[in-house]
Image (cartoon, rainbow, N blue to C red):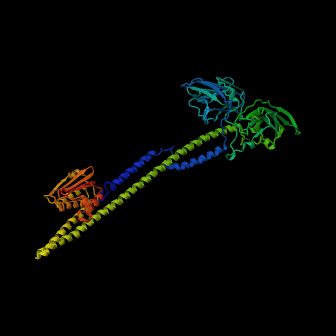
Amino acid sequence: MLSSQPSFRLSSVIFPTSVQITLASVFLAATLVTCAEELPPETDGVVWHQIPNVLDSLNTEVDEIQKQLAKLPEAEPIQQFEAYGYHGGYLPALDKLPETPRWTVDIEYLPKAPIGQAILVPAAERRFEGERNYGFPKRFRLLKVYPDGSVAPFAEWMDEDCPVLGRMPLIVDIPQPYTGTIRMEVFRGAMDGGRELFALDEFYCVADNDISHAMGITVSSEFESLPYWSKEFLVDQKTSLGLPLGASKNGKDTPSEKTDFSIEFDSKIHPEITVELDLGENKLLHEMILIPAAYSEGILIPGFGFPSDISINAYRENTDGSYGQQTEWEEQNHVKPGQNALRLRKTVHNVRWVELTFSGFSDNGDNAVISLGELIPRYKKKSHTVKSIRLVEGPTISDKKLKSLIDQKAAGRPVMFFLDWIKQVGERDVLRLQLEEKQALAARLEARWSAIWWFWGWVALAIVIVAAVWVTAYSVSQRRKHAFLLRRQISSDLHDDIGSSMSAVSLAMRRLRRISDQPEIHERCVKIDSILGNMQNAFQDVLWFTNSDTDSLRQMLSKLMHMAELYVPEDLLHLECTPLNDIPDRKLKVMFKRDLLMIFREALNNAVKHSQASEIHVTFGWRRGQLELTISDNGKGFDLEEVSKIQDNLPHLGLISMKRRIERLHAKYDLQSEPGKGTTLELSIPI
């Protein structure tokens, strides 16, 4: 079988060491370039070796923010079936900001109310999922309007869009001096296709750290669609944000049935229930806050079970401990707070007992239902602790159930002061945005760090491959070099030792023949000298095919042609060969050279010794990577079938060994012979 056979280097099949190292270096460089292209660019100014420390810091900050978020309340999912807020209507979209406002809203308060903040609650978007707002304006300004008609802007977004995201309220400080009217001028609303619109859920003004009650509202235009949109809904203190409930401790809500007052009666009709709250002593009181509860049977209607008719009486304690002067609130009829707290205000009074009567209950189709979360007596920002509660009128209700009205919890969570709650909801939203930013940055850095590890992993793999190739190439090269030196040493030893010995024997035979006069000795010396000549020829052949300097195809062909000229008499030989320059000078293995040489010599010997031919033709050709060799004679020939039967008894023909050598060369051959028609051997050997 042909293969490569370099002197000191790898051949065409196993590249030379220098070529392998070069290719491995190219592979390494290509790998580095490819990997480098996959690396993300420098992320947020963080150098790659700083990434682990920055990630640790980010993870610490994320954990801290998550701990803070766990302590803050959040807006509830939208459960608002009516009273969406104020809608100013649709107007064609404009390319430029107009000089005059497109919508104007004036909200009037008590002239001397010390208004210090404005809170704008975006209307909710119910058509899509997610925390989206509806109709919140892009460009607008807020102004104070004084009694003489003069105005003073205190906040504006005229050069850039207002950065309100989602449902979270916009809280704006209002500087002194106080004023009784706040105006909102909208120059560009929200975009809806080719139209602009302006909508707002609620407009709160804060005075003395409490929500101030609006006296009136005036708008430049209005899209009224009851019970959903009306200008009155802008100041009705009902929003889509949900109940003012704080975060649960340890992230777990108390079951609502333990914190809410929820009762199902035995029939659809129930007259009323009256409960009395005892404050323990006379205290200033100007407001009762009633928190709705979720009906325990799971009806998903906001405020289901909240009584529609409510009346309140308060009593002062006399010096002797008896009930004193009675204070009456106005009765509240057809109350529907939905997902909001109900605030019932009264002129400030100094009272101890507060009596609340509930009627007008809902029904679940079979029985009347009442559901309340909490009853909170308040004066300004202070909520009074209720010392005790008792049932004045109504069905038998356990003390435990009654106390759920004053446990300062609703829906399993603590009840909060509304302003504190709405500010903390805003803080939560700010923290949520910070958390998302830090998590996004951490994700980018982790992706980059992973890419860097991937990059250096490929680099390490490439280095290992280059090292393995180099070591393999070096090892093969050393083995080849050692084999080359060994072959050269063996050839030299054979030539020096055996060759010289045979030459010495030949000279001795010739000298013996000259000095001897006995015919028998002369005859023996001639035979011995002939045998030595054949041995020297065979020995020269061995030295030739073991010599690494004769490993090329061209040298092989030269050797075969020389052998043909040596073995075949000149008058019989007809030799043809393709020009050697047209034949590639490929490297050959030792066994290949030996087998081809032995096949050729055997074929020539058969033609010369046994064919009795007058012409022997030897042809060498090259075609499509194949060495084509033909040896033919015009001798007596032989019967192939007969020879194949008796060839085991005719070892002198050497056909068996020749066939084995041809198979080792993976050559194709064709042997043709007939008695009286000569013999032709054609070989096609892949190189």
Residue 380 visible in the displayed image? no
Foreground pick, 317 / 72: 72
Percent coordinates x, y for residue 245 in the rendering: 70, 40
Residues 199 and 282: in front is 199
Question: Which corner quadrant holds the C terminus?
Answer: bottom left
Residue 16 place in picture, x, y as percent: 32, 55
Say above or below: 555 vs 57. Answer: below
Instruction: Identify the residue at the far right of this view.
Output: 320
Q: Toward which corner of the image does residue 605 lie, by quadrant?
A: bottom left
Horizontal arrangement in the rendering, residue 207 relative to residue 567 (left or right): right
Depth check, front residue: 529 or 488: 529
- Residue found at the very far left of the displayed protein: 517
The image quadrant that residue 511 belongs to is bottom left
Left or right of residue 45: residue 398:
right
How many numbered circles are shown?
Answer: 0
Task: Give the quadrant of residue 268.
Answer: top right
**Above or below for 452 versus 477:** above
**What is the x, y in percent for residue 477?**
33, 59
Q: Nearer the viewer, residue 191 or 352?
A: 191
> Residue 508 location, x and y as percent?
16, 73
Residue drawn 23% across the image and 70% down it: 498
Q: Is residue 37 visible?
A: yes
Q: Is residue 391 above or below residue 1?
A: above
Looking at the figure, which quarter contains the N terminus? bottom left
